[in-house]
Image (tube, rainbow, N blue to C red):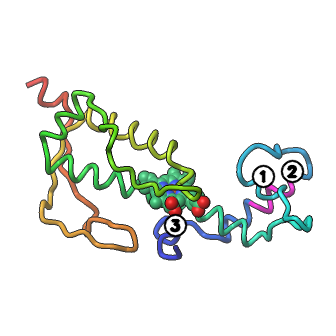
Amino acid sequence: MNKAGKASNIKSKDILEIIRQRKLDLAENKASPKQDILSHMWLRTFEDGQPMEERDIADKILGLIVGGHDTASTALTFVVKYLAKFPHIYNEVLKGKGPAPYTFVPFGGGLRMCPGIDYAWLVMLVFIHNLVTKFRWEEALPKEKTIFVPLAMPEKGLPIRLQAHSVYLDK
Ligand code: HEM
């Protein structure tokens, strides 16, 4: 988590500042108690009436940012990689064929299933739609290794050669 947090360039000090500012804004009615998860975390109390500690809230917000950002960007990185490797799949996606109903979805299951699933699907589908309908691409380093830091990542950041559809459609 620490590494991932550093990779995303987020500091818990910055988050603490945002939390303290929100506390002031809530007290002065400049922020709404229902506006987002940060307000909820401030205003909900434990059974003994105590609110959560600032540091705990910061930790949870950082978890949401890292858990929400690095997961989807990692998944998209490998979508880009494998669509370059398998043009027949790229063509199916370009024709608008979505994932089959039995497609494996790595979001866990049961009570602790990922709460970001709908948002993550939306972000990924919008990204893939825009990319595939506008561009074709190939890997600059087809033999690039995958490293784990701790999430999977192409060792050199997946350099690609990108070409807009309009470039070759006009030819
Ligand atoms: C492609 C994107 C994502 C993948 C693959 C993914 C995957 C997962 C997995 C496997 C779990 C553990 C589930 C379990 O224990 O059964 C999880 C938990 C969680 N995810 Fe995601 N996630 C993604 C996006 C997001 C987003 C966008 C958010 C928030 C905006 C998010 C927030 C969380 C949180 C808070 C938990 C902990 C839930 C709990 O312990 O009750 N995730 N995620």
Q: Do the residues bearing badges 3 and 1 touch, measured as CB atoms within 8 Å?
A: no
What span is in magenta?
Answer: 19-25
Q: Residues within 10 Å of mark 3 (few under 14, many from 20)?
A: few
Q: Is residue 11 magenta?
A: no
Residue mark closest to the camera, 3 vs 1: 1
Q: Which residue is mark 2?
A: 26
Q: Is residue 36 above or below residue 21?
A: above
CA distance for labels 3 and 2 = 27 Å
Q: Do the residues bearing badges 1 and 2 touch, measured as CB atoms within 8 Å?
A: yes
Amino acid residing under circle 2: Leu
Q: Quadrant of residue 139?
A: bottom left
Q: Nearer the viewer, residue 84 or 164?
A: 84
CA distance for labels 3 and 1 = 23 Å
At 72% from the left edge and 65% from the top edge, which residue is drawn?
A: 57
Q: Please state if 65 lies on the left or on the right of 162 as rendered.
A: right
Task: Name which of mark 3 and mark 2 comes first in the sequence.
Answer: 3
Q: Which residue is mark 1?
A: 39
Q: Do the residues bearing badges 3 and 2 touch, measured as CB atoms within 8 Å?
A: no
Q: Residues within 10 Å of mark 1 (few under 14, many from 20)?
A: some
Q: Which residue is mark 3?
A: 9
Task: Name which of mark 3 and mark 1 comes first in the sequence.
Answer: 3
The single residue placed furthest to the left in the displayed view is: 171
Residue 68 visible, this angle: no
Element assignment for label 2: helix
Q: Measured from the top left, where is residue 70 in percent x and y?
A: 45, 60
Q: Residues within 10 Å of mark 2 (few under 14, many from 20)?
A: some
Task: Name which of mark 1 and mark 2 comes first in the sequence.
Answer: 2
The single residue placed furthest to the top in the displayed view is: 170
Q: Is residue 24 magenta?
A: yes
Q: Measured from the top left, where is residue 59 in percent x and y?
A: 66, 69
